[in-house]
Image (spheres, rainbow, N blue to C red):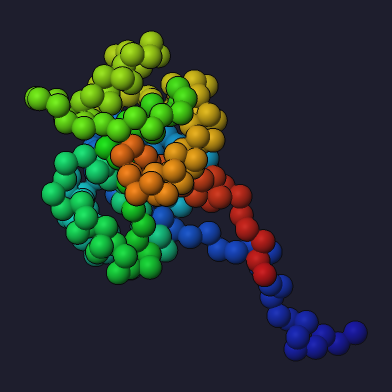
Amino acid sequence: MARTVTSFNRPKPRFKPQPTVLVICEDIKSGKRYLEDASQHFRATVLVEITHCGKTDPLSIVKEAISRQGKFDRVFCAIDRDTHATFDEAMRLAKTSKKVGIIASYPCFEFWLLLHFGYNRKPYAAAGAHSAADLLIKDLRSHSVLENYDKGKVLDVFKLMLENGFAEARRIAPKVLIEAIASEEMNPSTRLHELLDFFEELSSPQQAE
């Protein structure tokens, strides 16, 4: 039987093309390593590039994200509120791009780790020579599994915490964020769970429409 022109058409793809993703971290060590291990856990490493751009203030990181957004479908900036003077300006600048998203933690990334041990909405503020992040990390070290945690060191924190409250943190973090937004007091809160959820989505191809 003769073939028609339409019979030579290629079948439509079953799945949507997966987006390419860039994650720019403020933290060059523990936070960056955590996200690298997380992307590997969710099998999203082929699609996700995680980097540190040599800058640590939020505004410079967002500017870097915008300058590189042409090569990626999505760009995330994982930043800490802490005491950064450029944080608010960085948040405003990020809103000018549809591709750039902010994964902010108040006061710092370690609040996400603290949620592995249960619900927490105690605000952290600098006291004396200690920053808000210092005081939060002190609370984090009160838990034996992280008693030797050091922000400046590369640690296998993701692998360590995967069986020590990971599911609990993912359950609690959205609730904490909702409460923070409703109260207009973001300290403490984090959006890190949103990035992990996105990694998980990447591991499951979406059906084409």
Residue 41, x across and y down, in percent = 50, 35
Q: What residue occupies the far top of the structure in this picture?
A: 144
169 left or right of 155 in image: right
Query: As drawn, which residue projects farthest toward the front?
Result: 183
Q: x, y (%) of residue 186?
A: 33, 44
Residue 13 x/y as whole percent: 66, 67
Q: Image height check: is 116 above or below 78?
A: above
Q: Specify whether residue 46 is in view.
A: no
> Could you say which is closer to the camera, residue 149 or residue 89?
89
Q: Position of residue 119 (x, y in %)?
A: 46, 28
Q: Nearer the viewer, residue 125 or 99?
A: 125
**On the picture, is 37 further left or further right than 88?**
right
Residue 167 lies in quadrant: top right
At horizontal 38% and vertical 32% (from top left) the residue drawn is 121
Image quarter for residue 101? bottom left
Name which residue lies at 27% across and 45% down: 79
Q: Which quadrant is the N terminus positioned in?
A: bottom right
Please report the residue visible at 24 percent of the width from the left and 43 percent of the height from the top. 81
